[in-house]
Image (cartoon, helix red, strand yellow):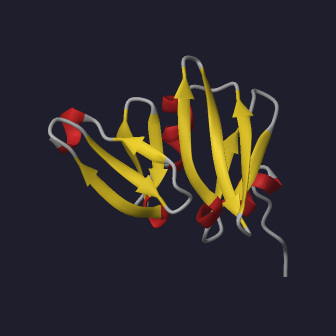
């Protein structure tokens, strides 16, 4: 039996398996993370910070890509853009807060994420 060679890199093949995401850190480096570990991605101008949580430990990975560039590759059924500066993993939502003119999500780790008025008001 002849093996079929893929034009994709081994990381892209691995990321395509169930539960994995391929996230670009820089132009020359990508990481593969378990989708369940991704809490949220916060955009900061032209850069982003990727917030992971595994085994009750938080890890932050800096990326030289904007939130939009990262979001194009990871937004799916359970991962949503909820604000101009945030993409969240819905698995990590603990609480929905509603104040007079402000709505937000609180993640299981205690981090509060604002919700866009355009999308949720």
Which of these two is toward me, 92 or 80?
92
78 shown above or below 8: below
53 sits to left or right of 1: left
Q: Residue at x 36, y 51 (%)?
A: 105
Q: Residue at x 75, y 29 (%)?
A: 26
| Observer able to see residue 7 | no
| Observer able to see residue 68 | yes
- Residue 84, given in percent of the width and then of the height, sits at 38, 29
Give the total number of marks visible in the rendering: 0
Farthest residue toward the bottom?
Answer: 1
Which of these two is toward me, 73 or 113?
113
- Residue 97, given in percent of the width and then of the height, sits at 28, 52
53 shown above or below 100: below
Which of these two is toward me, 31 or 82?
82
Q: Residue at x 30, y 57 (%)?
A: 96
Farthest residue toward the front?
Answer: 99
Which of these two is toward me, 31 or 50?
50
**Could you tell me which quadrant the N terminus lies in?**
bottom right
**Could you tell me which quadrant the C terminus lies in?**
top left
């Amino acid at each position: 039996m002849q093996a079929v060679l893929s034009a994709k890199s081994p990381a892209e093949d691995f990321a395509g398996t169930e539960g994995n995401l391929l996230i670009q850190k820089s132009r020359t480096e990508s990481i593969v993370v378990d989708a369940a570990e991704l809490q949220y991605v916060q955009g900061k101008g032209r850069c982003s910070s990727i917030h992971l949580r595994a085994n009750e430990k938080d890890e932050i990975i800096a990326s030289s890509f904007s939130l939009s560039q990262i979001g194009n590759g990871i937004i799916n059924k359970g991962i949503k853009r909820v604000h101009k500066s945030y993409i969240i993993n819905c698995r990590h939502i603990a609480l929905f807060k509603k104040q007079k003119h402000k709505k937000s999500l609180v993640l299981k780790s205690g981090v509060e994420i604002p919700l866009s008025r355009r999308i949720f008001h």
